[in-house]
Image: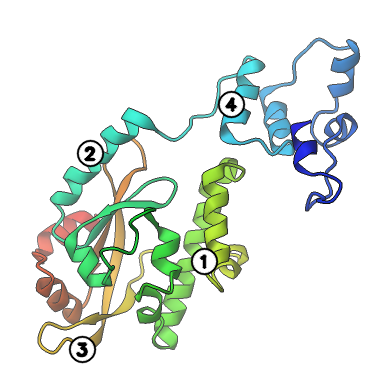
Amino acid sequence: MKRQRQYAADRSHPSLKRFTQQELNDEACPTYKNLLVGRSHRLPDRQTMLRIAEYLECTSDERNELLAAAGYLPIHSDMAGRSLEHELEQARRLMRNVPFPAMIVTSTLEIVEFNEPFRRLFEIPCNLFIKDRMTLVDFHFNPDLSIRSRSTFDAESFEKWESHAVFGMDAFKRNHLLSRHDDWYQKLIRQFNQYGGADEYRNIARNPEYDYNHSKVILARTESSGDLVPIRYKQIYLSAGRSMYPRVGVFLPVDEPARKTFAYLGCSVDYSSMLYMVQ
């Protein structure tokens, strides 16, 4: 009934769902009518309950309420509240010991904090994200930032940037398949749509031969003249606690211009620590 109210007569569902008992029986739970009339008293198995939740486009909370009502264990949700704050504090301590540009990213792709070398390398304006936190969508696509233009200055850099964007969006969809009806997920989709041309990368199939560990290219400022020169860097993620998120994204120099740039940013370019972090 809730889904029916969401899609009134003047706003049809994109897949033409009607959210009726008959449709639920046909699409997700063939024994639903038997349950309704009392011919069966056996609850559907857990996998069927998940199909019902998928058909009803449940949020994470709604799906877990449905599972609990049927006597099944809920699906683990992302940390929140004190647990999340504890993990974030661990991530902050880790980032303070990282001698390179670094950022802290949550499971919802929020960049909750970054260090000074990161801000200077990518020239993030101090007052750009006062009301809302920056996300990885903003980081890669926001036209008010120079990252996209400096990462796509020639054919090679554009190809690397585009492959990375497609890989990231494909990973995002796979990792959050069960959360795509949640508010935070829909907010990110609206962000994709907000930045012209960003949404098209959401539906491109990832190249199976894409190497996530390949180096990336960006134009960065030199210490001597302030001119923009191409540098190569790699990005890795370090887990700060028990879970994958929150985690610390670290940017490592690959070539000599990058090492000089990172030294100019105040980074201690220690090759032994670089090797340890990559391993």
Q: Is mark 1 on a helix, strand or loop?
A: helix
Query: What residue does disc 3 label?
Result: 227
Residue contact at pointers 2 and 3, CB within 8 angstroms: no
Residue at coordinates 55% horizontally, 24% vertically from top-left? Answer: 74
Residue contact at pointers 4 and 1, CB within 8 angstroms: no
Quarter of the picture containing the C terminus is bottom left
- Asked if residue 95 is positioned above or below residue 58 in the image, the reply reads below
Residue 158 position within the rendered picture, expressed as x and y whole percent measured from the top left:
44, 81
Residue 195 position within the rendered picture, expressed as x and y whole percent measured from the top left:
52, 69
Query: What residue does disc 1 label?
Result: 166
Which is closer to the viewer, label 4 or label 1?
4
- Label 1 amino acid? Val
Q: Is mark 4 on a helix, strand or loop?
A: helix
Nearest the eye: 168 or 87: 87
- Label 2 amino acid? Glu
- Label 4 amino acid? Asn
Residue contact at pointers 3 and 4, CB within 8 angstroms: no
- First along the sequence among labels 3 and 4: 4
- First along the sequence among labels 1 and 2: 2
- Asked if residue 183 is positioned above or below residue 28 in the image, the reply reads below
Q: How far apart are marks 4 and 2 (CA)?
A: 28 Å
Q: Is mark 3 on a helix, strand or loop?
A: loop
- Asked if residue 143 is positioned above or below residue 27 in the image, the reply reads below
Q: What element carries label 2?
A: helix
Query: What residue does disc 2 label?
Result: 89
- First along the sequence among labels 2 and 3: 2
Q: Distance between the residues labelled 1 and 2?
A: 31 Å
Query: What residue does disc 4 label?
Result: 64
Residue at coordinates 10% horizontally, 75% vertically from top-left? Answer: 264
Residue at coordinates 55% horizontally, 73% vertically from top-left? Answer: 196
Which is closer to the viewer, label 1 or label 3?
3
